[in-house]
Amino acid sequence: MPEPVVEKTCEALCRSLVAHNGLQPESADISRSVVYTSLMGLLLVADKKADIPLGSGQVGLRNIGNTCFLNAVVQCLSHTRGLRDYCLTKAYLQEKHSKQEPVLMNAFTHVLSGLWDVQGQDCVNPGRFYSAFKDAVPYFSGYSQQDAQEFLRFLLDRLHTEINRRPAKCPPSETTETKHKTIRLAEQAAAMWKKHLERDDSRIVDLFSGQLRSSLHCSVCSHYSNTFDVFCDLSLPIPKRSGDTVSLKECLDLFSQVEKLDAENAPLCERCRRRTESTKRLTIQRFPKVIVIHLNRFTTSRYSISKSTVCVTFPINHLDLGPYGPVDCGPVLYKLYAVCYHSGTVNMGHYTACCRDEDGWWYYNDSSVQQVPEDQLQSSQAYVLFYQLDSNAIRK
Ligand SMILES: *[C@@H]1O[C@H](CO)[C@@H](O)[C@H](O)[C@H]1NC(C)=O
Ligand SMILES: [Zn+2]
């Protein structure tokens, strides 16, 4: 085996582990041979997994009565490789902690098996899966059309619960009260993340979960404090402007901009021990492998919901989220692989999806599937964007 290639692969993997698994570079100083052996092991396992026979995935889903929201989201998830392969190999049966039958996960896997069937089915009926979902989330039982983003959140949450590697009732671990000591931010974030994984650890978490940091700065005493929250998608506000096009970057900037809080609306300052005029800023502390970006087009006012039809342009191959991460984290590049669209009005809408495979982009409109040129992805109907961390693009 030509060694330089392996060395290069291992190095790239190591760097990506260091950059994205919250390891501090100084603690990643393990001997080369150990790294080599374990990484080669991982590579072999990964190769074996990719061996399942697959069809093209260019298969539609039947609309069984206002289910376009479900069909569009399922197509996007079906093109999330780490999730698809985990389902199709039934790896979750080995990993999950609960003894209960993973009813929803099995039904979801059944749909994916149809979509990726080597024989190439015409169209898959998601009926059984939808019933299992409504049993798990009775809130969705109504007949009216549902919101795709809401559906996605509930679905990932329920799937996670079924395939959690941790027991359902896990005593909260003793937190050493470090709040008032000056510990490093990264350590504090890593401790919070570890605590999260003690209760919630699944393939869903491996893929979709990241960590948001909210930093609060008191304008009276200049004290900084941080809170860390797990997120499974970023819900971005769309800037209100007179023009009819904004960029995803402008939405991200708005999401992450410094926000002034007056004394009534601010949380307690830890040092002043009262509410003070403060500023708050949100940043991404830990980047997920897959980032789901929700363009928040629907605004709920007192009496109604309105929809923004502003066209939000988004990068396809190089979305750099580095500027919204920890200071000096360098570029963090993501590649788009699926988009969920919403057309029409709040009450009379239709959901569709575009997903990428080796042959290009495909447009999924319920049971119909058509190839679509990449330059037609941008539209004022784009609603949820699915990006995958581009591990080949990690530099530094
Ligand atoms: C999606 O399919 C429906 C009917 O099945 C059709 O009316 C609609 O025009 C299609 N949308 C697009 C954008 O192709
Ligand atoms: Zn203060």
Image: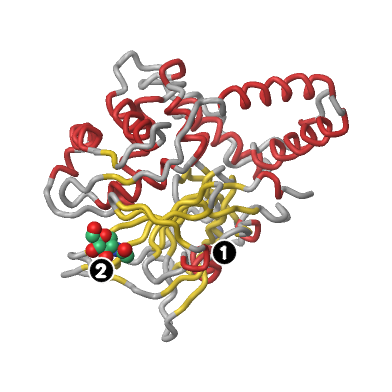
Q: Position of residue 137 (x, y in %)?
A: 22, 37
Q: Earlier in the sequence, mark 1 or mark 2?
A: 1
Residue 289 in which image quadrant: top right
Would residue 265 be seen by someone viewing this image from the given angle? Answer: yes
Q: Residue 28 versus residue 170: which sits nearer the camera?
A: 28
Residue 1 versus residue 388 in the image, above or below? above
User: Residue 262 location in percent, x, y?
Assistant: 44, 69
Q: Residue furthest bottom?
A: 242
Drawn side of residue 270 relative to residue 395, left or right: left
Give the residue at mark 1: 315
Residue bearing mark 2:
344
- Near-viewer residue (273 or 60): 60
Q: Residue shown at 19%/34% (left/top)?
A: 131
> Where is residue 175 drawn, in percent x and y?
53, 29
Three-letter code for the amino acid on which mark 2 is drawn:
Gly
In the image: residue 40, left or right of residue 78: right
Residue with the most extreme left position? 143
- 354 or 191, which lies in front? 354
User: Residue at left 50%, top 24%?
Assistant: 174
Quadrant position of ligand 1? bottom left
Q: Quadrant of the N terminus?
A: top right
Residue 376: give x, y in percent of width and height: 47, 67
Would you say residue 257 is visible in this rendering? no
Amino acid, disc 1: Pro
Residue at the spot 46% in from the left edge and 46% down from the top edge: 231
Disc 2 under 8 Å from ligand 1? The reply is: no
Considering every residue shown, the one lying at the far front of the view is 119
